[in-house]
């Protein structure tokens, strides 16, 4: 079997390795001339028989390759992979509705039109007069409509802060290295944040994982990732979640492939924050496979190779272990001059694995969003209370600069 991964960065790197291990041959297409800085470390062109930068002339190379599938390896590749899979008659979502899955403003409108709970919002373009913001919306969330990972997201408490955030986003490129063409202003709502990973085939949607997520507010305006817990028996913990996800993915015209969904669980039930028609970023799948027997990556690879849902999957999963994902948070920028991460965190009996942990000599930014997050790690065990105890110990080490010393 032969296939093409578009922008195989982040989790796309692990998808490529999984497919290669299962006998696939791969070609890679870059949708942009340069690999975005955020993902350069997680792009390995040696995994592919050929790597080409997309242009209309690339269609001849694709046709000659005779691919069996064309899929996105990251958020940047979603639009182009849908365009190409449709052009070559392969499985995928229709490119005419790509905006519903890529543009957060179109996304919210589609959810609202489907009668599902949504967040009050509007969008502005460059040089457009900013409409009046209702006073009862404040604080509001300002963010680009087509970025990802908390990039450009600012919590604003006044009109002046909103105007400053909009100006900053329009004068900056996003994490993909592209200009921001539209900015979303949303009423800020509260609730428990959840992340839901799904897989779809022919419009049938299966929930694979539900993670309960906790974030921190930095400087009263930036949102950073703190920790995530894999939820067991989510239909009991969050009754009605499955029905909302089914309606949401149908409203966004998802027919095929993985989706990563972020939402609030409020007193009234689930409310969409945003979704992405691709694999969850920043994972390698190993920890989920240890607890569930499958992962977002392995389930999608199975779908690609076998064109069906793995038999073990159902809409009610029972995990075998508790999983806690902890993100490193650096309160200051600097260069790491010493590290005790391996001895301290690696010495915990619950420690499973890590991704992107910085080493001595690395420069680290102050953590203000996903783009400035430099690593995370997983704790696995039978007792979630013990894992949370380990979490508090890690945060204490972090506060006391015992994990890393910066200069």
Image: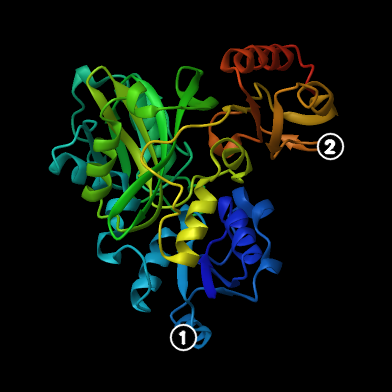
Query: In the figure, 244 relative to 45: above or below?
Result: above
Instruction: Give how far across and how far down residue 253 sits, in percent.
Output: 25, 55
C-alpha gap between disc 1 and disc 2: 46 Å
The answer to whether residue 2 of the structure is visible from this angle is: yes
Residue 17 shown left or right of residue 130 in the figure: right
Residue 339 falls in image quadrant: top right
Q: Which residue has dot 1 on it?
A: 63
Disc on the earlier residue, 1 or 2: 1
Q: Above or below — where is 37 with respect to 90? A: above
Q: The residue tagged with tag 1: helix, strand or loop?
A: helix
Residue 228 appears at what percent x and percent y?
Answer: 52, 27
Task: Relative to 101, say whether 20 is above or below.
Answer: below
Judge by depth and name the residue closer to the eye, 287 or 39. Answer: 287
Q: Which residue is mark 2?
A: 361
Q: Residue at x 47, y 36 (%)?
A: 150
The reply to whether residue 328 is in sight is no
Question: To which quarter of the image does residue 321 belong?
Answer: top right
Q: Furthest-front residue in view?
A: 311
45 left or right of 27 in image: right
Residue 266 x/y as whole percent? 29, 20
Q: Residue at left 66%, top 36%?
A: 374
């Amino acid at each position: 079997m032969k296939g093409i991964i578009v922008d195989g960065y982040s989790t796309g790197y692990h998808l490529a390795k999984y497919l290669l291990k299962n006998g696939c041959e791969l070609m890679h297409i870059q949708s942009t001339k340069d690999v975005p800085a955020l993902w350069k470390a997680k792009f390995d062109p040696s995994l592919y028989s050929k790597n080409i930068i997309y242009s209309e002339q690339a269609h001849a190379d694709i046709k000659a390759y005779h691919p069996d599938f064309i899929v996105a390896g990251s958020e940047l590749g979603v639009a182009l992979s849908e365009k190409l899979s449709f052009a070559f008659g392969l499985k995928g979502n229709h490119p005419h509705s790509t905006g519903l899955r890529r543009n957060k403003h179109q996304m919210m409108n589609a959810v609202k039109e489907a009668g599902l709970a949504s967040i009050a919002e509007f969008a502005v373009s460059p040089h457009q007069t900013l409409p009046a913001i209702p006073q009862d919306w404040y604080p509001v969330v300002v963010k680009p409509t087509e970025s990802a990972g908390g990039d450009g997201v600012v919590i604003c408490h006044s009109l002046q802060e909103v105007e400053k955030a909009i100006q900053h986003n329009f004068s900056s490129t996003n994490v993909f290295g592209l200009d921001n063409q539209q900015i979303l202003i949303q009423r800020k709502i509260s609730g428990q944040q959840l992340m839901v990973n799904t897989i779809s085939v022919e419009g049938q949607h299966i929930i694979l994982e539900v993670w309960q997520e906790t974030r921190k507010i930095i400087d009263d305006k930036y949102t950073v990732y703190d920790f995530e817990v894999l939820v067991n028996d989510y239909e009991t913990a969050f009754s009605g979640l499955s029905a909302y996800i089914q309606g949401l993915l149908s409203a966004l015209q998802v027919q095929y492939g993985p989706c990563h969904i972020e939402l609030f669980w409020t007193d009234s039930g689930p409310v969409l924050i945003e979704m992405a028609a691709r694999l969850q970023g920043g994972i390698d799948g190993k920890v989920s496979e240890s607890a569930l027997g499958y992962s977002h990556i392995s389930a999608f690879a199975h779908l690609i190779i076998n064109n069906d849902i793995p038999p073990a999957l159902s809409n009610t999963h029972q995990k075998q272990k508790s999983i806690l994902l902890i993100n490193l948070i650096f309160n200051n920028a600097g260069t790491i001059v010493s590290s005790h991460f391996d001895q301290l965190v690696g010495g915990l009996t619950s420690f499973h694995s890590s991704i992107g942990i910085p080493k001595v000599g690395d420069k680290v930014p102050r953590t203000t969003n996903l783009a400035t997050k430099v690593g995370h790690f997983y704790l696995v065990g039978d007792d979630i209370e013990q894992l949370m105890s380990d979490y508090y110990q890690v945060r204490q080490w972090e506060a006391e600069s015992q994990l890393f010393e910066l200069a």
